[in-house]
Image: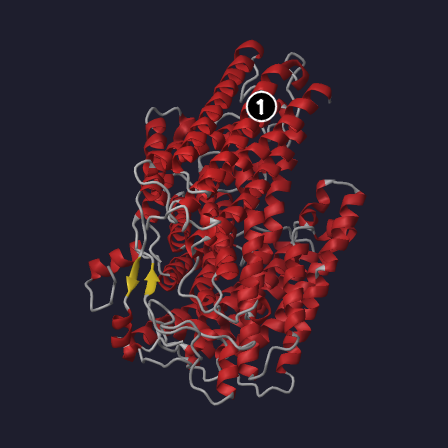
Amino acid sequence: MQTDERFTDATWPASPEKATLDGKNKYLGFWLFLGGETVLFASLFATYLALKDKVPNGDAALAKDLFELPLTFVATMLLLTSSLTSVYAMYHMKNNHFKQMQAWLVITVALGFGFLGLEIYEFNHYVHEFHHTFTSSAFGSAFYTLVGFHGGHVAFGLVWIISLMVRNAGRGLNLYNAPKFFVASLYWHFIDVVWVFIFTVVYLMGMVG
Amino acid sequence: MSTYANKKGFGATLWDYLTTVDHKKIAILYLISGGLFFVIGGLEAMFIRIQLAIPNNDFVSAGFYNEILTMHGTTMIFLAAMPLVFAVMNAVVPLQIGARDVAFPFLNSLGFWLFFFGGVFLNLSWFLGGAPDAGWTSYASLSLHSEGHGIDFYVLGLQISGFGTLIAGINFLVTIINMRAPGMTYMRMPLFTWSTFVVSALILFAFPPLTVGLVLMMFDRMFGANFFDVAAGGNTIIWEHLFWIFGHPEVYILILPAFGIFSEIFATFSRKRLFGYSSMVFATVLIGFLGFMVWAHHMFTTGLGPIANAIFAVATMAIAVPTGIKIFNWIFTMWGGSVKFTVPMLYAVAFIPTFTMGGVTGIMLASAPADYQYHDSYFVVAHFHYVIVGGVVLGLLAGINFYWPKMFGTMLSEKLGQITFWTFLIGFHLTFFIQHFLGLMGMPRRVFTFLDDQGFNTGNMISTVGAFLMAFGVLVMVINIIITSVKNEKVGNDPWGDGRTLEWAIPSPPPFYNFKQLPLVRGLDPYWVEKMEGKKEMTPAEPLGDIHMPNSSILPLTIASGLFIAAFGALYHMDDKTWTLPIMIVGLLVTFGSMFIRSVKDDHGYHIHKEDLMDDKDKGGKA
């Protein structure tokens, strides 16, 4: 099968991400990869819970001193919305509407940058106001590792989606790049799900626990 | 684009292997590098046994002994056993399911190069200031205070090779789910493919905890974090948990493929269908599942409390049930069969009592109260060598003898193979049986010497003699391989004469596209089914047509080499050198740059045309 052939709306398959064997393999392989990523984050969550508020002396800031819900709420909303817009992008991908898909991906990426900006501000705030750093305590190490791993995933996802958009801007959709866009959106959803758990376990439980 | 192999020069062949994405060539790369690390790990074992041959020996110093001991365990598990398992998997699984390649040929190559660079990085520690010396488990309380860079080599090298293993696991899962030939249902898959399938799932869920543990250790040692530093609120038990959540499934990752290899060998040389096929599949899956529930039996003496210890003790003992099912099924496969004692079959028959002994001591160790006596004694050393050498290594030796003709098109000598078998087996029991008693008499593991009047002298001397016998067996095997390769007498599709599964229906070695036409699978042991109906080859499931093949690529090597470079930057970062940050950046740029090129450069592969395949008659390859 010629994977780079041009399609019309009539010939475009219903699930372009799984229309070729290559696409099917990518689709399944990526789901499995996300299974492994889940265990990766589960290990980081377990480490965080074991080391939460474990600090060397009484002066160090604890979770309840650090976190502020308004900031985290805005960050959460940005990321959750970006997941929704990536769904819209995939909806247009499935309908062979390349322009609309790109437009929604631009919005997704913009929201992702907004989230990342807030996270950088937040980390900076903790370091300078509370002297809560990566090296100041076990709590600090665990916090920045868990949340930072997530932030690193967001940054990687942004670079990935932008590369795909730029690379394919001139040629539109085909069965070769459709699975790539789809898999990138799966990754983006996964990042979002992990954040829901971070929001709950780190921030909400940090405020009340 | 097609790489029809004519006589090529050395440079061209080398380039071919550096860029190959063919599962059969990657199998050979895994075999060579795994074999090399096996020899290095074996030499380290010999140093250990020479040092312990007599009391108060000073063959090596205490510190150097710690390094040898650590590197022996780490090398044998991560750099010898794992890649040799992958060698057999790569060589056989795509053929057994009737596929032309794996699902992700590019990633297959990437997985190999990550493993290779990780392994080389780890072993460079010998030349760059000393190897890791905190044991292969590298418990944080010990390793955080290890001087020099040994532990850093361990942490970074295993991270790199761990990524490779994870990728290989995902690749095999997708291959087995998506790429099976028409008619190859799950319950018609050969047992080796089944065990690869289960093992790949174990890899997928077991390696991330190891990666996290290694990352935390890296942060602690190189970047000033405090995960395991109790003074700053840290907790060293976290390392033990993360390590064993990986470490216990890891032993099943190693043993299940050996079980799969033996299942193929028992059926082939008993010339009889494997007894209880579905219960074998069930037992494999159950072992894989239970393998995740038992990690804390390595930590009975850590002090998790009686309830945790009791739960993990019971779960551990439960694994004896599916393993027992397997042992009985193998015996029943031989029962009433027309058994032929070839070299692979000798290994298989010897494996049953040897592995059972390892299993029985496993049950003894699983009793948490009794474990307080056995813990950290030579009894444990004897136990895990009985399951790993008596199970995994015998399985790999059997598998290499069994599949050698399929991989290289020529048979290893049976006579030299028998010499290897007997010396290795007798040497093995001589080395490790006595260690049970040394352990029960109180000899602790991981000590570099012992005193004269403790009653350990005879036992240790016997153990050392046995080790030399094992080394002799391996040496004969190397000679066997050299002689066989020089003679290079070509064999046909089914050199053992009793092949049952698809890989024996195609030439040895198979053409690079494996199957000219995909085969139609009409039952369990599909080739045997066709043979019993008097046919010489498989029934094709498709007309002859163009075959799509993946392109070779150098990018897997560059991606892996970038991490190798960056690891040096991270390693020396704590020495406050100015060049470490640039090195890290350069290395990561190489890696991510290669990934970026891979992402933006289209790779559609190429087609072998029908006409070329028809010209290719002599090479066979018909389904």
Looking at this rendering, what residue extends furthest in the top direction? A129
* Residue at mark 1: A77
Q: In this view, does B326 lie to the left or right of B177?
A: right
Could you tell me if residue B366 is visible in this image? yes
Q: In this view, does B485 lie to the left or right of A50?
A: left
Picture quadrant of residue B195: bottom right
Above or below for B78 versus B353: above
Under circle 1, the secondary element is: helix
Measured as percent of width and height from the top left, residue B32 is found at: 37, 61
Q: Mark 1 lies on which chain?
A: A
Q: Which of B427 and B141 is in front in this view?
A: B141
Measured as percent of width and height from the top left, residue B48 is found at: 50, 55
Point 43% across, 46% down: residue: A179
Point 59% across, 69% down: residue: B429
Picture quadrant of residue B18: bottom left
Three-letter code, disc 1: Met
Could you tell me if residue B61 is visible in this image? no
Measured as percent of width and height from the top left, residue B477 is found at: 41, 71
Q: Is residue B380 left or right of residue B254?
A: right
Point 33% across, 37% down: residue: A167
